[in-house]
């Protein structure tokens, strides 16, 4: 089976930097994605790492270490609108089958 | 361009009934996936369809089934509803068979009483 671990809650202040970690155990792994979901909204795609290293997209960066089965999402210059749930998700491939498995999510609260 | 659309937005059903949820992907997207999300949890993968063929199936009972039509829209069917099926059902589309970058619809909130 698959398992993903991420913190349930993180709190930070506006302008700060926050890192949300994700560790995973799975077979057929081929990448790690991050999604943001505001209350009452749909998940929106933030970033994807298939290879080791850092991917940067504006204020958001994502990192992957395949050997450590670990990744993180880094949010810089936090804004109030960043308050949301953040999910890591592993892409799994088995033959022609594809599956995206989400973690339980990290609730980020940004304080003024 | 329109995003992923789902219908209905809300639905109330009784235990034992059947439900059909519908999804239209972003124009040009050939892959549709279905997820179940209960409050406080991440979306749980149910199915992926690509080019009208099932490409992936999550750990859900056979009461759950889906199909994709020639225009790439999709239906999710759930038979013999249980109280535990109450959840937000999300549909997501992607442009190719890859599953890592998905565009989600607003979801259908299903309540089973």
Image: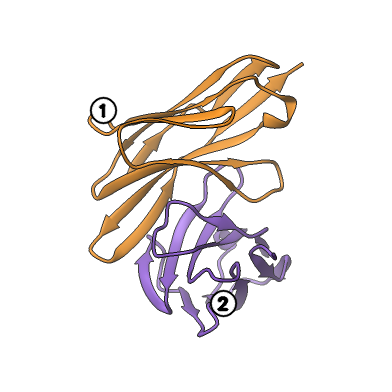
Chain colours: A orange, B purple
Q: Residues within 10 Å of mark 1 (few under 14, many from 20)?
A: few
Asked whether the beta carbons under mark 1 and mark 2 sit within 8 Å of each other, the answer is no
Residue shown at the point (71%, 71%) measured from the top left = B8
Up-down relation of residue B108 to residue A102 (above or below): below
| Category of crowding for the residue at label 2, using alpha-carbon neighbours closer than 10 angstroms: few (below 14), some (14–19), many (at least 20) | many
Q: Are marks 1 and 2 on the same chain?
A: no
Quarter of the image where one finds residue B18: bottom right
In the image, B78: left or right of A78? left
The residue that disc 2 covers is: B73
Q: Quick check: can you spot residue A45?
A: yes
Q: Quadrant of the C terminus of chain A?
A: top right
In the image: residue A78, left or right of residue B96:
right
The residue sitting at 48% across, 76% down in the picture is B66
Q: Residue at x 27, y 66 (%)?
A: A96
Report x, y in % for residue B73.
56, 77
Q: Which residue is mark 1?
A: A68
Relative image position of residue B20 (x, y in whole percent): 60, 77
Q: Is residue B106 left or right of residue B83?
A: right
Chain that bears disc 1:
A
Front in this rendered view, residue A28 or B84: A28
Q: Say above or below: A30 vs A97.
A: above
């Amino acid at each position: 089976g698959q398992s993903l671990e991420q913190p349930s809650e993180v709190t930070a202040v506006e302008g700060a930097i926050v890192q949300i970690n994700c560790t995973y155990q799975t077979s057929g792994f081929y990448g790690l994605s991050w999604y943001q979901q505001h209350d009452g909204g749909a998940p929106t795609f933030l970033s994807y790492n298939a290879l080791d290293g850092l991917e940067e997209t504006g204020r958001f960066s994502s990192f992957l270490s395949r050997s450590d089965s670990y990744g993180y999402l880094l949010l810089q210059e936090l804004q109030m609108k960043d308050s949301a749930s953040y999910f890591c998700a592993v892409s799994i491939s088995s033959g022609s089958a594809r599956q995206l498995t989400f973690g339980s999510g990290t609730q980020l609260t940004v304080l003024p | 361009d329109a995003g992923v659309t789902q219908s209905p937005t809300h639905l109330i059903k009784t235990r034992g009934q059947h439900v059909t949820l519908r999804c239209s992907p972003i124009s040009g997207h050939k892959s549709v996936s279905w997820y179940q999300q209960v409050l406080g949890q991440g979306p749980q993968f149910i199915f992926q369809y690509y080019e009208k063929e099932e490409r992936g199936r999550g750990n859900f009972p056979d009461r759950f089934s889906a199909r994709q039509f020639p225009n790439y829209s999709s239906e999710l069917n759930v038979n013999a509803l249980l109280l535990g099926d109450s959840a937000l059902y999300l549909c997501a589309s992607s442009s190719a068979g890859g599953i890592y970058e998905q565009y989600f619809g607003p979801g259908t909130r299903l309540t089973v009483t």
